[in-house]
């Protein structure tokens, strides 16, 4: 696809349908097995390339401007890699990036990683650096373990430290997602002293045939009493479970009507929404279509 110089791009959320910790490496990073599922809910990025060499972020979420966020990190990383590998083929070497945020920070929906992935993919096109998705995934791994999943753009079972992906296709589902207004640090959850047991690694078929669980859910319930109470309340409506390292919880349904019936029961003081599963990232649907 020949893309326009000014365009608004999706930065979708994900949910982890299961998440298991299978061990810890010598470098202290944890190995995982997870089922990574895109949903039709997320942020948007408008990226305007320029010839100034500067990279600037604009957003109403002022807290993102006060630290080194994933968008600026991704743009600077791509620029650095482009120079190292002599991939800057045209005069565009800067950008103004406008972020419209919907994905809560620290929610387990992958907002920061998704933003980084969208930035890498779109600027790779706009700056004409011509890196492959596999190369971008390796760059993305320097930012976070979820970034390669967003870059490759398929529902996938992900292993290792986020660097091993097995694309799969899942039947369409609908989800009710609830955000308890709690920010959970992924790093702190992996360092939580309650994380003491590891799962043995399973085959893809074993993973898909077994009940889906999340190793961090019990840890989150013990660490954040609000999550424990929320799961107890919502369990009277449907089976809810946690995504990622938290804090969002979700329930799965076969059709939209069933999801919306439960959604209407969610207390109004909770942030919640209904979303559909996507086997292909909406960013891929836009940028790689013929």
Image (cartoon, grey):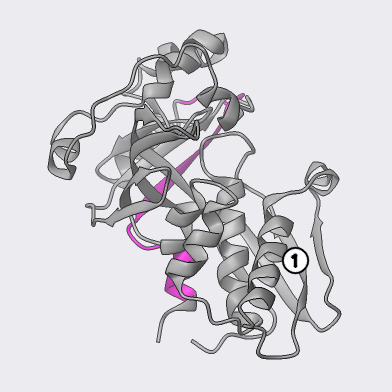
2 over 93 or under it: above or below: below
Q: Is residue 46 above or below residue 258?
A: below
Q: Which residues are magenta?
A: 266-286
Residue 247: x, y in percent? Answer: 53, 27
Task: Using residue 9 as the reference point, say whether residue 149 is left or right of it.
Answer: left
Left or right side of 100 for 146 = left
Is 285 within the magenta?
Answer: yes
**Place of residue 159 in the rendered image (x, y in percent of width and height, measured from the top left):** 33, 44
Q: Nearer the viewer, residue 253 or 93?
A: 93
Rendered view: 197 above or below 29: above
SS type, badge 1: strand
Q: Position of residue 104 (x, y in %)?
A: 62, 39
As drawn, 2 above or below 273: below
Look at mark 1 in the image and give the residue it sits on: 97
Rendered residue at 24%/56% (across/down): 168
Q: Is residue 234 magenta?
A: no
**Front residue (pair 279, 162):** 162
Can you give x and y, in whole percent of width and height, for residue 173 in the image? 29, 47
């Amino acid at each position: 696809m020949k893309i326009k110089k000014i365009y608004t791009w999706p930065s979708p959320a994900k949910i982890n349908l299961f998440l298991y910790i299978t061990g810890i490496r010598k470098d202290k990073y944890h190995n995982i097995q997870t089922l990574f599922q895109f949903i039709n809910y997320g942020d948007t990025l408008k990226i305007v390339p320029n010839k100034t060499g500067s990279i600037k972020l604009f957003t109403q979420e002022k807290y993102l401007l006060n630290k080194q966020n994933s968008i600026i990190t991704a743009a600077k990383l791509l620029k650095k890699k482009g120079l190292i590998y002599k991939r800057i083929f045209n005069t565009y070497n800067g950008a103004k990036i406008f972020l419209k945020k919907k994905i809560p920070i620290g929610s387990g929906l992958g907002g920061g990683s998704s933003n980084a992935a969208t930035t890498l993919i779109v600027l790779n096109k706009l700056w004409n650096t011509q890196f492959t998705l596999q190369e971008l995934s390796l760059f993305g791994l320097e930012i976070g373990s979820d970034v390669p999943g967003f870059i490759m753009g398929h529902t996938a079972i992900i292993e290792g430290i986020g660097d091993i992906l097995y694309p799969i296709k899942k039947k369409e589902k609908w989800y009710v997602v609830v955000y308890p207004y709690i920010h959970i640090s992924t790093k702190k959850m992996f360092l939580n002293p309650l994380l003491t047991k590891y799962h043995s690694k399973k085959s893809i078929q074993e993973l898909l045939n077994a009940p889906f669980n999340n190793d961090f859910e019990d840890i989150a319930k013990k660490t954040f009493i609000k999550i424990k109470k929320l799961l107890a309340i919502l369990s009277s409506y449907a089976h809810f479970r946690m995504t990622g390292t938290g804090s969002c919880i979700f329930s799965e349904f076969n059709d939209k009507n069933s999801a919306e019936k439960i959604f209407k029961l969610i207390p109004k003081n909770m942030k919640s929404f209904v979303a559909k599963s996507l086997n292909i990232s909406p960013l891929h649907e836009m940028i790689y279509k013929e």
